[in-house]
């Protein structure tokens, strides 16, 4: 009996990769975004955030429905853990940067791809490593499957991330490009060294939004809690630093988060 002609061609790695990519696209089509169900304490700005549990809940079923599995393994530290003392009682906080390998596998073909990822955890107790694991998984899923959350890391408070249209008749700030590093703009101003008390020379605008006083107060409390035996929070210096960096006051939680991320305690504290 003659053999049947036109036997199926053996699949190549390219075929497996194509099938894998199609399944990832189906996951992205299934989950269109993640809702912010978490809320930070009022003293930290009260901003909304996406919980890892919410991301996992939505992605997990989509992965399973498309025969994709996911594995996570910690592979080591990215640099040494960093310790710092915070508050009047000198509580030690430890920051861990942990490297992870996250693997997605096509359960039908066995084809897999592994991605290197880093998670960071900051805690005074025993949860810093746990926070690093949680953050790594959450942001891997958000970024790898392009899930929108409503945040824009490059935005401040205004729709275009730019400075306010005017300054209510006051003289313009001598630092014209909000977003540039503080030290860079100081050197651009006639080559003069930084002033010891910049708040006296910066033409600070009055708060012009109902949310600003509460946000600034919460941010001040946040930086004040980081006082140590050598440094003490200076609220005037803090206000000047915010105005010099951005040329506007925060009016939303996103603006508050940007300030917390970009301004360090030592930028707004006086050495004792």
Image (tube, helix red, strand yellow):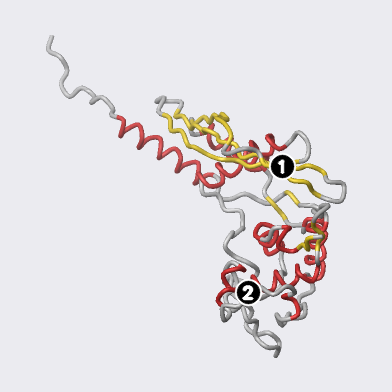
Residue furthest out toward the top: 1
- The total number of labels drawn is 2
Residue 63 in sight from this viewpoint: yes
Query: Residue 136, labelled with which disc?
Result: none
Q: Which residue is mark 2?
A: 193
**Is 46 situated above or below 108?**
below
- Apparent side of residue 10 relative to residue 247 in the rendered image (left or right): left
Q: Position of residue 213 (x, y in %)?
A: 81, 70
Eye-nearest disc, 2 or 1: 2
- Is residue 79 toward the left or the right of residue 128 in the image? left
Q: Quadrant of residue 272?
A: bottom right
Q: Is residue 109 above or below residue 138?
A: above
Where disc 2 sits, the SS reads loop
Other residues around mark 1 within 10 Å, as few (<14) / some (14–19) / many (≥20):
some
> What is the quadrant of residue 48 in the picture?
bottom right
Alpha carbon separation for disc pair 2 and 1:
31 Å
Q: Within the image, what quadrant is residue 166 found in?
A: bottom right
Kindly tell me whether residue 72 is visible in this rendering: no
Q: Residue at x 57, y 62 (%)?
A: 154
Direction right: furthest residue = 89
Q: In the displayed structure, does residue 10 sit left or right of residue 81?
A: left
Q: Residue at x 57, y 53 (%)?
A: 148
Question: In this orientation, which residue lies closer to the viewer: 7 or 20?
Answer: 20
Q: Position of residue 128 (x, y in %)?
A: 71, 38
Q: The residue tagged with tag 1: helix, strand or loop?
A: strand
Q: Which residue is mark 1?
A: 83
């Amino acid at each position: 009996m003659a053999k049947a002609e036109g036997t199926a061609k053996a699949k190549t790695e390219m075929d497996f990769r194509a099938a894998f990519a199609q399944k990832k696209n189906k996951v992205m089509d299934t989950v269109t975004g993640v809702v912010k169900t978490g809320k930070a304490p009022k003293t930290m700005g009260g901003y909304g955030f996406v919980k890892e549990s919410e991301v996992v809940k939505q992605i997990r079923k989509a992965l399973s429905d498309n025969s994709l599995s996911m594995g996570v393994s910690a592979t080591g530290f990215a640099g040494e853990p960093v310790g710092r003392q915070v508050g009047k009682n000198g509580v030690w906080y430890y920051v861990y940067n942990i490297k992870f390998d996250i693997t997605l596998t096509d359960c039908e073909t066995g084809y897999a791809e592994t991605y290197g990822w880093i998670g960071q955890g900051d805690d005074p107790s025993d949860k810093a490593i746990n926070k690093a694991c949680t953050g790594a998984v959450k942001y891997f899923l958000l970024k790898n499957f392009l899930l929108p959350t409503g945040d824009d890391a490059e935005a401040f408070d205004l729709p275009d991330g730019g400075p306010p249209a005017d300054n209510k008749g006051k003289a313009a700030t001598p630092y014209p490009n909000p977003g540039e590093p503080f030290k860079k703009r100081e050197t651009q101003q006639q080559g003069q060294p930084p002033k010891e008390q910049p708040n006296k020379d910066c033409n600070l605008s009055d708060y012009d939004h109902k949310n600003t006083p509460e946000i600034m107060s919460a941010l001040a409390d946040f930086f004040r809690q980081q006082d140590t035996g050598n440094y003490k929070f200076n609220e005037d210096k803090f206000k000047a630093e915010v105005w010099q960096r951005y040329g506007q006051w925060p009016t939303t939680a996103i603006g508050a988060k940007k300030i917390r991320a970009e301004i360090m305690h030592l930028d707004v504290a006086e050495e004792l």
